[in-house]
Every structure is written in C-alpha cells, then in structure tokens.
Image (tube, rainbow, N blue to C red):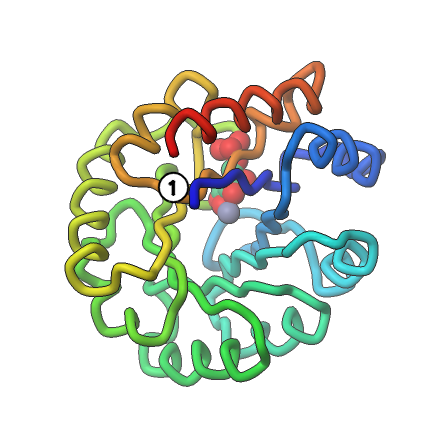
C-alpha cells in the first residue's frame, strides 16, 4: 500500500489545524511529527503536549519520529501522548533498542527503526523481527526544506531488496526532500510511504497539492 505522510514540521504552527484539514481534504490519511532534542540533531521541535493536542484532534494515525539522543527517556511520553507509531534511530542507544521496540509494540503502537544517510542499510537487520516499518532518511536529519540526497535512490533499492528477502511485511518509508517531481521515481525504486513536509505545507494550495500526491500514489499502485 503506497501512501503519503505529511510532516507537520513544515506546517504553519499558527494555523496548524486548518492546514491539517486542508491536507486531509486532499487525501492525507496520516501525520508525521518530528521530535528533535537539540542533541541528536541541531534543532528543537515538538514536545509530548503538542503530540497529545494533535492526537486529540485527528482521527488519523500520528507517527512520532524520535530524533533524540536517548529515546529510552521519551518513548513512553509519546506513547502516552497518543502516538500510533514511534520511530527510533539505529544510531542511538543500540543496547536498549530491542526492549524499546517491544515496549512500543506492547503498548499497541507500531514500532519502527530509522536510518541516517551515513548508516549502512544492513544496520536494520538485528531489529527486523521487532518492527513494522523502516524509515530511510534522504536528508541529514534536523531540518525541513533540504534537497533529497542523490545517493538515496541506490539506498532505497538496496533496502527494498533486503526487506523483500528478510521481512516482506515491513514497510519502507522515506523522509526528506520529497517533491512532486521526484516522488514517481522514489516509489518506483521501492518506497511505500512518502514523508513530505515543505512539498505539502509549503504549497499555495495544500489541498490541491495533496490531491496531486494522491494521483501519483494511485498511479504507482
Ligand atoms: C527532517 C525530518 C523530516 C522533514 C521533512 O529531519 O525528519 O520529516 O520534516 O521535510 P521536507 O519534506 O521539507 O524535507
Ligand atoms: Zn521525520
């Protein structure tokens, strides 16, 4: 199932609800929330209370993408805030990750693992039995509005064949620098879920932009 997950980091915080409604009218059916701690990445974003507010006002799934140095301090906070999926980076607290992924699953949420652009795709292998999704970063994490890294296409294909071989039910998400122009080739290379921020919320007409993405996703089925 190919789908779009708009990243709320790019939305105008002053009129977040209105922009989410516009994206939903255009076909968006899930939300991506980037959680940044100023340590793992050089930026700060949303806390659990914002996540709780958003989860309280939407019927759609909310993914918490934890870009934090010590996810073991934050996983339960975002589960309690209502996140329906929680993604942790392979580059953090490796010893604690298997337990954290089980905690997410046991809480009834979807566990996922994330790869930074410099991390070999094989780094997901120890966790595949514990996750329902793998997120591949196609930009260096920490900011929206960056250009997609060209090496991402090769990494998508490598991860796609690894997942098809080792864990065919695990979905491949891509995050960073996605546009209407590069989306068809990214889906063709093997992406299941497109996480897009500025390409959605930076559009003059957010609803129309999501309809355009929905058309691309439909064509890729
Ligand atoms: C970056 C975040 C992305 C980002 C995507 O660290 O993980 O989710 O918000 O934004 P765009 O689509 O603008 O690159
Ligand atoms: Zn993200």
**Up-down relation of residue 70 to residue 2 (above or below):** below
Residue 106 is left or right of residue 24, and the answer is left
Q: Can residue 144 be seen at all in this image of the molecule? A: no
Number of marks drawn: 1
Residue for point 28% across, 40% down: 190
**Up-down relation of residue 215 to residue 155 (above or below):** above
**Up-down relation of residue 176 to residue 91 (above or below):** above
Q: Tell me where residue 121 sits by quadrant.
A: bottom left
Residue identified by numbered label 1 = 140
Classify mark 1 as within 8 Å of ligand 1 or not, answering yes or no.
Answer: yes
Foreground pick, 211 / 130: 211
Q: Can residue 43 be seen at all in this image of the molecule? A: yes
Instruction: Give x and y (percent) for residue 137.
Output: 37, 45
Image quarter in which the C terminus is found: top left
**Up-down relation of residue 80 to residue 181 (above or below):** below
Q: Tell me where residue 77 sits by quadrant.
A: bottom right
Q: Tell me where residue 53 sits by quadrant.
A: bottom right
Instruction: Give x and y (percent) for residue 133.
Output: 40, 59
Residue for point 30% across, 25% down: 185
| Mark 1: few/some/many CA within 10 Å (<14, 14-19, 20+) | some
Foreground pick, 70 / 25: 25
Residue for point 43% across, 46% down: 1
Secondary structure at badge 1 equals loop
Instruction: Give x and y (percent) for residue 147.
Output: 40, 25
Instruction: Give x and y (percent) for residue 109.
Output: 56, 71
Residue for point 83% across, 34% down: 18
């Amino acid at each position: 199932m190919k789908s779009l997950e708009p990243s709320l980091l790019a939305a105008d915080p002053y009129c977040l609800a209105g922009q989410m409604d516009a994206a939903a009218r255009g076909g968006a059916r899930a939300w991506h929330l980037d959680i940044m701690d100023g340590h793992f990445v050089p930026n700060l974003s949303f806390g659990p209370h914002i996540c709780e507010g958003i989860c309280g006002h939407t019927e759609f799934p909310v993914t918490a993408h934890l870009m934090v140095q010590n996810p073991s301090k934050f996983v339960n906070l975002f589960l309690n805030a209502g996140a329906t999926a929680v993604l942790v980076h392979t580059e953090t607290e490796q010893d604690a990750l298997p337990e954290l992924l089980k905690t997410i699953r046991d809480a009834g949420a979807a566990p996922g693992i994330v790869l930074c652009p410099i991390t070999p795709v094989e780094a997901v292998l120890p966790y595949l039995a514990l996750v329902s999704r793998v997120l591949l970063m196609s930009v260096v994490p920490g900011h929206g509005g960056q250009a997609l890294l060209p090496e991402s296409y090769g990494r998508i294909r490598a991860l796609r064949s690894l997942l098809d071989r080792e864990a065919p039910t695990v979905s491949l998400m891509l995050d960073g620098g996605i546009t209407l122009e590069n989306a068809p080739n990214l889906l063709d290379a093997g992406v299941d879920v497109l996480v897009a921020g500025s390409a959605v919320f930076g559009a003059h007409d957010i609803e129309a932009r999501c309809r355009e993405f929905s058309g691309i996703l439909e064509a890729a089925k």
